[in-house]
Amino acid sequence: MEEMMVVVDVVEGIPLSLVSFPGLFSKKRLDLGTRILLENLVIPEEGTVADVGCGYGPVGIYVAVRNPRLNVYMLDVNPLAVKASQMNVERYGLQGRVKVMKSDLLEKLEGKVRAIYSNPPLSKGVEILERLAEQAASKLDKEGWIQLVLYRGETNALKIFTKYFSRVETVKKVKGYSLVLVVND
């Protein structure tokens, strides 16, 4: 059994206590990029949203706790991340409306979502942004949005997402991180 750890933090008044494992991104504490994303999330009043590349689940859990009317998909290609996220969904008692799935980006997602949130692993290369933009173009509701936090990947993201969406803008920059908003007009 892998050595489990717990990431504890408070974001915008919401306490997070999340199980994590060695080998997962930012396994011991909430990373700055994810914190910036969480503090600036645009959360719909109702509907379904997706946390893409969910890791151990800080974004999906936070969104589900912030708005009990939302259904949340938490997607990750890493089986260990899926396991940790599922454990966190159960810790918070969110099984009824939060679904964790092993998925390469949005591939396994059926139907459309109102919003997509991601702190994509740019270490995997710019190709991940290409695939995310292409998949999101068919999975995002009209008037839906994508919020991405990127460490030094802003230029590529703006160029790539503009091929699929008419409104793509950087809304905030903090310590090398850019928060990019994409709207499906």
Image (tube, helix red, strand yellow):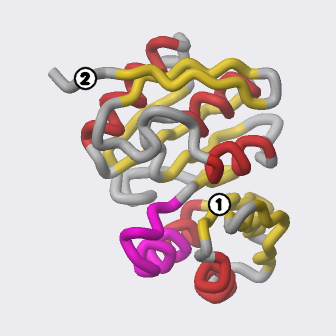
Q: Position of residue 54 (x, y in %)?
A: 47, 44
Relative to 53, 69 lies left or right: right
> Residue 110 or 58: which is nearer the viewer?
58
Provide residue 29's location: percent of width, then percent of height: 53, 34
**Quadrant assignment for the N terminus:** top left
Vertical comparison of 144 with 25: above or below: below
Residues at badges 2 and 1 in contact (C-beta under 8 Å)? no
Q: In this figure, which residue is indicated by the disc labeled 1?
A: 149
Give the residue type at disc 1: Val
| Rendered-image quadrant of the C terminus | bottom right
- Label 2 crowd (10 A; few <14 / some 14-19 / many >=20): few
Q: Residue at x 68, y 61 (%)?
A: 146
- Number of the label disc, if any, that sits on residue 3: 2
Magenta span has 54? no
Amino acid type for the residue under numbered disc 2: Glu
Image position, residue 184 (x, y; %)? 74, 69
Which range of residues does the magenta coloring cover?
120-133
| Residue at (31% x, 30% y) in the render | 83
133 relative to 109, above or below: below
Q: Position of residue 55 (x, y in %)?
A: 43, 42
Query: Quadrant of the rendered structure where residue 171 is?
Result: bottom right
| Label 1 CA crowd tier, 10 Å (few <14, some 14–19, many 20+) | many
- Separation (CA) of disc 2 from disc 1: 29 Å
Front one among 4 and 137: 4
Which residue in the rendered view is the most extreme toward the left? 1
